[in-house]
């Protein structure tokens, strides 16, 4: 298996349902970020995914598709991220969609390019939380989900998704203590260099998303903030 994805520290996440200028997209891809993920919750279409893919491919930055639905899956990405929403109340988001995708595409799958993410969505006001019908976990629940991701499912990634709001650094620290081999991704609410450094102190990778669309200059500064703090 190619483990280069596990070495990522800073990741930009682009939403195919949102507009971004060529100038801003070029700046993202040339920023020094370790990777770009294409993914979103609502309005993810094949056309939107293909548009971003063709524009990102002008650059050398690694790019991954986080699969949101069956209709938007396309070849051409370096990696494919497969979410399993661990705190969803519906098996659909943990197993059924993944089963459907593998049933349809298994002859085409290269598992060196596939990374399953154990998702824990932690903002009950977010579209992702509501769409996947999640229960709000307490701190012990989240630690247990992380432990399951590593020891029960042997997942390469555990993703703490605060989806638009800034999370709790102390909980990120506690969750990290549960993981030895599974990598911890943090995403949500990053607005400045202090926050990205704070979360990177515990998470293996920090994902910056909404800030790209709210303040592109500040988003670009987060790359240096993370990489200057790497050990």
Image: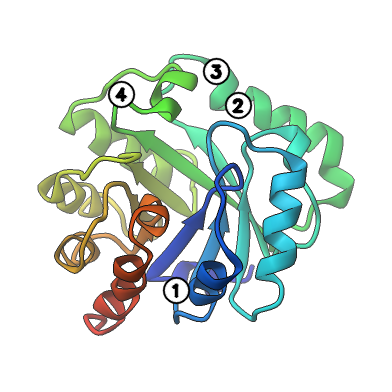
Residue receiving disc 2 = 95
Q: Secondary structure at mark 1?
A: helix
Whether residues under marks 2 and 3 lie with C-beta atoms below 8 angstroms apart, the answer is: yes
Q: Earlier in the sequence, mark 4 or mark 1?
A: 1
- Residue at figure coordinates x 79%, y 50% from the top left: 74
Neighbourhood count class around disc 3 (C-alpha, 10 Å): few under 14, some 14–19, many 20 upward: some
Residue 121: image location, x then y, percent: 36, 33
Residue 3: image location, x then y, percent: 55, 71
Residue receiving disc 1 = 7
As drawn, is 146 to the left or to the right of 62?
left
Q: Earlier in the sequence, mark 4 or mark 2?
A: 2
- Residue at figure coordinates x 18%, y 60% from the top left: 195
Residue 184: image location, x then y, percent: 35, 55
Q: Is residue 22 visible?
A: yes
Residue receiving disc 4 = 125
Q: Residue furthest left?
A: 170
- Residue at figure coordinates x 69%, y 67% from the top left: 55
Q: Secondary structure at mark 3?
A: helix
Residue receiving disc 3 = 91
As drawn, is 148 to the left or to the right of 48?
left
Whether residues under marks 1 and 3 lie with C-beta atoms below 8 angstroms apart, the answer is: no
As drawn, is 110 to the left or to the right of 116?
right
């Amino acid at each position: 298996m190619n483990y280069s994805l596990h070495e990522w520290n800073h990741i930009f996440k682009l939403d195919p349902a949102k507009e971004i200028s060529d100038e801003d997209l070029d700046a993202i891809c040339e920023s020094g970020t370790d990777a770009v993920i294409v993914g979103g919750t609502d309005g993810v279409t094949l056309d939107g995914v293909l548009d971003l893919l063709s524009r990102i491919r002008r650059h050398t930055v690694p790019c991954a598709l986080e699969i949101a639905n069956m209709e938007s899956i396309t070849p051409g990405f370096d990696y494919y991220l497969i979410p399993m929403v661990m705190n969803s109340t519906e098996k659909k988001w943990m197993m059924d969609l993944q089963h459907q995708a593998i049933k349809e595409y298994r002859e085409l799958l290269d598992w060196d390019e596939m990374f399953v993410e154990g998702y824990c969505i932690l903002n009950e006001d977010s579209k992702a939380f509501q769409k996947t019908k999640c229960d709000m976990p307490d701190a012990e629940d989240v630690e247990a989900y992380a432990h399951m991701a590593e020891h029960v499912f042997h997942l390469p990634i555990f993703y703490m998704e605060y989806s638009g709001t800034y999370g709790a650094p102390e909980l990120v620290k506690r969750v990290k203590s549960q993981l030895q081999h599974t990598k911890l991704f943090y995403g949500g609410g990053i607005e400045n260099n202090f926050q990205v450094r704070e979360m990177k102190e515990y998470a293996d990778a920090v994902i910056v998303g909404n800030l790209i669309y709210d303040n592109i200059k500040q988003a670009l500064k987060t790359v240096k903030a993370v990489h200057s703090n790497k050990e």
